[in-house]
């Protein structure tokens, strides 16, 4: 097992250390699906997820504010970046500005945080600063207006990489203790400011998975 200790600063969300599962032969392929309404494809729908934890099941309503506290002893230009779990490129820069000597608290904009496992970094242009993993589990009602995992195409289709979902990986947090992300998954589909559909599925390893999600 490969252990990553990334908890280096304080915040108010559920922060994690990760234990990547390298002992299992299971591998997960791209999770694909289509969103339909009365048999017709739904274009540009937001595809959100909810992880299933063992123990814990499907959890929502946890404290999801991400407030990062840090201190700098010299004036510097700082950059805050947000990543999906196990990805190498940030999908958003949530802070970039010069700071003087002192203590600071940065808040990641709520609109950038859908559900799932995220990593952030606070760094300067010259060096890596602090980083951490955080799990976000919002109630369904708070997902519209946040950045989804992906959006459906003109054909209503979507594809999710299994890597940032974290199937089979184990985590440790002070609040929750040890838990694993299972291969059960809930899709929450948004359209505009509303929830269009929800569906719980099981993503099977070592095979293709394609799910048809129909709205009300």
Image (tube, helix red, strand yellow):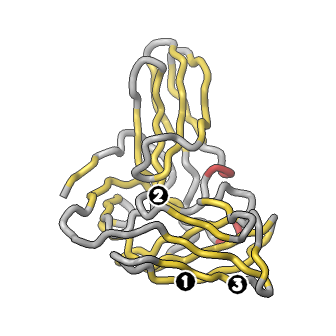
Q: Nearer the viewer, mark 1 or mark 2?
A: 1
Residue at 44% across, 58% down: 164
Q: How much space separates mark 1 and mark 2, taking CA atoms?
A: 18 Å
Q: Which mark is residue 86?
A: none
Residue designated by label 1: 200
Could you say which is closer to the camera, residue 85 or residue 124?
A: 85
Residue at 57% across, 44% down: 91
In which quarter of the view is residue 149 placed? bottom right
Could you say which is closer to the camera, residue 89 or residue 115?
A: 89
SS under mark 3: strand
The quarter of the image holding the N terminus is bottom left
Q: Position of residue 197 (x, y in %)?
A: 70, 80
SS under mark 1: strand
Q: Is residue 179 visible?
A: no
Residue designated by label 2: 117
Contact (CB < 8 A) between labels 3 and 1? no
Q: Is residue 79 above or below residue 193?
A: above
Residue designated by label 3: 214
The quarter of the image holding the C terminus is bottom right
């Amino acid at each position: 097992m490969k252990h990553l200790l990334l908890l280096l600063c304080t915040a108010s969300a559920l922060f994690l250390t990760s234990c990547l599962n390298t002992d299992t032969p299971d591998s997960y392929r791209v999770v694909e699906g289509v969103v339909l309404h009365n048999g017709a494809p739904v274009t540009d729908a937001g595809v959100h997820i909810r992880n299933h934890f063992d123990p814990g099941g499907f959890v929502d309503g946890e404290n999801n504010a991400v407030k990062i506290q840090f201190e700098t002893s010299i004036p510097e230009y700082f950059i805050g970046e947000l990543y999906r779990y196990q990805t190498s490129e940030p999908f958003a820069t949530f802070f970039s500005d010069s700071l003087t000597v002192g203590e600071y608290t940065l808040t990641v904009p709520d609109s950038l945080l859908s559900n799932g496992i995220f990593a952030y970094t606070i760094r300067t242009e010259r060096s890596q600063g602090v980083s951490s993993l955080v799990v976000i589990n919002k109630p369904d009602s708070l997902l519209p207006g946040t950045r989804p995992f992906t959006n459906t195409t003109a054909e209503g289709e979507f594809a999710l990489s299994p890597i940032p979902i974290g199937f089979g990986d184990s985590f440790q947090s002070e609040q929750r203790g040890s838990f694993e992300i299972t291969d059960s998954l809930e899709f929450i589909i948004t359209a505009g400011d509303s929830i269009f559909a929800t569906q719980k599925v099981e993503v099977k390893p070592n095979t293709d998975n394609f799910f048809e999600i129909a709205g009300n």
